[in-house]
Amino acid sequence: MDMPRLGGDARVDCMSDAPLYPMRTVVRLTNVEAHRIRFWESRYGLITPSRDESGRRLYSGRDIELIRRIGEMVDRDGMSLSAICGLLGQPAA
């Protein structure tokens, strides 16, 4: 399966659940640092990427849109991750 070519103005199918995008691509598309994404996953369970056979994270279009939204809520709106968990219907850590 060919990976989509992603440039600076890349578009992601936000409705896709297919795990296509590795971490480096997600970082480029969302402007959210990898360590923050991993923290949101491990500490709060906000993102649940798929894994390839080597254990590397693969993100879907829906995951990318969620990461963008979480980043905006934290950085632009000043929301806490616990509040975001509440909005998303997840128990806060």
Image (cartoon, rainbow, N blue to C red):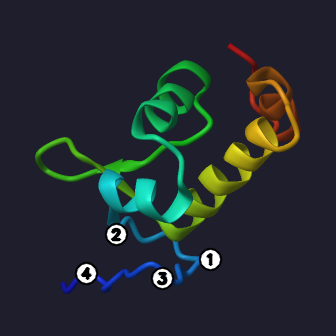
Question: Answer yes or no: do the residues labelled 1 and 2 have beta carbons within 8 Å?
Answer: no
Measured along the vertical axis of the image, is residue 68 above or below residue 36?
below
What secondary structure is found at the residue carrying circle 4? loop
Measured along the vertical axis of the image, is residue 75 above or below residue 28?
above
Q: Earlier in the sequence, mark 3 or mark 1?
A: 3
Please rate how many residues cluster around mark 4, counting C-alpha atoms within 10 Å: few if below 14, some from 14 to 19, many from 20: few
- Residue at point 62%, 76% (across, down): 15
| Amino acid type at image mark 4 | Met
Identify which residue, 28 or 15, lies in the foreground.
28
The residue mark sitting in front, 3 or 1, is 3
**Which numbered circle lies on residue 15?**
1
Please rate how many residues cluster around mark 1, counting C-alpha atoms within 10 Å: few if below 14, some from 14 to 19, many from 20: few
Measured along the vertical axis of the image, is residue 1 above or below residue 20?
below
Please rate how many residues cluster around mark 2, counting C-alpha atoms within 10 Å: few if below 14, some from 14 to 19, many from 20: some
Q: CA distance from mark 3 to mark 1?
A: 15 Å
In x, y percent, where is residue 39?
50, 26
Say whether residue 43 is left or right of residue 60.
Answer: right
Q: Which residue is mark 4?
A: 3
Question: Answer yes or no: do the residues labelled 2 and 3 have beta carbons within 8 Å?
Answer: no
Q: CA distance from mark 2 to mark 3?
A: 14 Å
Q: Quadrant of residue 30?
A: bottom right
- Residue at point 35%, 65% (across, down): 21
Q: CA distance from mark 3 to mark 4?
A: 13 Å
Q: Which residue is mark 3?
A: 10
| Amino acid type at image mark 3 | Ala
Question: Answer yes or no: do the residues labelled 2 and 4 have beta carbons within 8 Å?
Answer: yes
Please rate how many residues cluster around mark 3, counting C-alpha atoms within 10 Å: few if below 14, some from 14 to 19, many from 20: few
